[in-house]
Image (cartoon, rainbow, N blue to C red):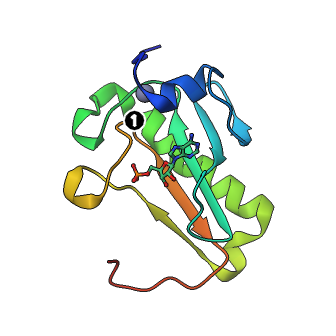
């Protein structure tokens, strides 16, 4: 498992920083965003430290795909698929990425504007 000792989300993976976990498995964890932007705002992250999309390796295909299946399953069990939900990855500075450990935002419970800001 690849960990960055200075990475906030690696510390959450290691349970060294608390988070409201809503899912965990051998490849991923999911937890509530500390500053929610919608009634449901969950972050789904790989346990492995991957800083951004450009840093993904060919061997990460299954792992990255798994993030989307976790999102789909959480949305299904919570009934979020009825009204819909938005999945977001902010990649890099101009996109507003603040934490450089890949994370998929699962947002739901209100209508979202398009185009995004
Ligand atoms: P991004 O801007 O895409 O990098 O998103 C980072 C997200 O992490 C933001 O939505 C923050 O609110 C969230 N965040 C930062 N620190 C924590 C934390 N300790 N626990 C849960 N979410 C966090
Ligand atoms: Zn990390």
Please name the residue shown 37% across and 30% down the image.
Answer: 60
Please name the residue shown 32% across and 33% down the image.
Answer: 51
Residue 59 location, x and y as percent? 34, 25
Q: How many marks?
A: 1
Which quadrant: the C terminus?
Answer: bottom left
Question: Can you say whether 42 is above or below 8 in the image?
Answer: below
Please name the residue shown 47% across and 44% down the image.
Answer: 65
Q: Is mark 1 within 8 Å of ligand 2?
A: yes
Residue 106 location, x and y as percent? 56, 60
- Residue that badge 1 annotates: 101
Question: Can you say whether 110 is above or below 108 in the image?
Answer: below
Q: Secondary structure at mark 1?
A: loop
- Report the side of 115 relative to 78 (left or right): left
Badge 1 crowding class, 10 Å Cα cut-off, few under 14, some 14 to 19, many 20 or more, is many
Residue 54 location, x and y as percent? 21, 39
Question: Can you say whether 26 is above or below 74 in the image?
Answer: above
- Report the side of 27 relative to 61 (left or right): right
| Front-most of residues 97 and 84 | 97
- Report the side of 99 relative to 22 (left or right): left
Please name the residue shown 28% across and 30% down the image.
Answer: 58
Residue 103 location, x and y as percent? 46, 45
């Amino acid at each position: 498992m690849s960990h960055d000792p200075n990475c906030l989300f690696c510390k959450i993976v290691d349970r060294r920083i608390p988070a409201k976990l809503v899912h965990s498995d051998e490849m991923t964890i999911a937890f509530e965003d500390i500053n929610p932007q919608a009634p449901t705002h969950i972050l789904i992250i790989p346990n492995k430290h991957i800083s951004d999309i450009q840093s993904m390796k060919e061997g990460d295909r299954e792992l990255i795909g798994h993030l989307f299946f976790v999102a789909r399953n959480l949305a299904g069990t919570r009934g979020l698929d009825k009204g819909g939900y938005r999945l977001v990855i902010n990649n890099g500075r101009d996109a507003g990425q603040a934490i450089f450990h890949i994370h998929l935002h699962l947002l739901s419970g209100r209508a979202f504007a398009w185009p995004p800001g």
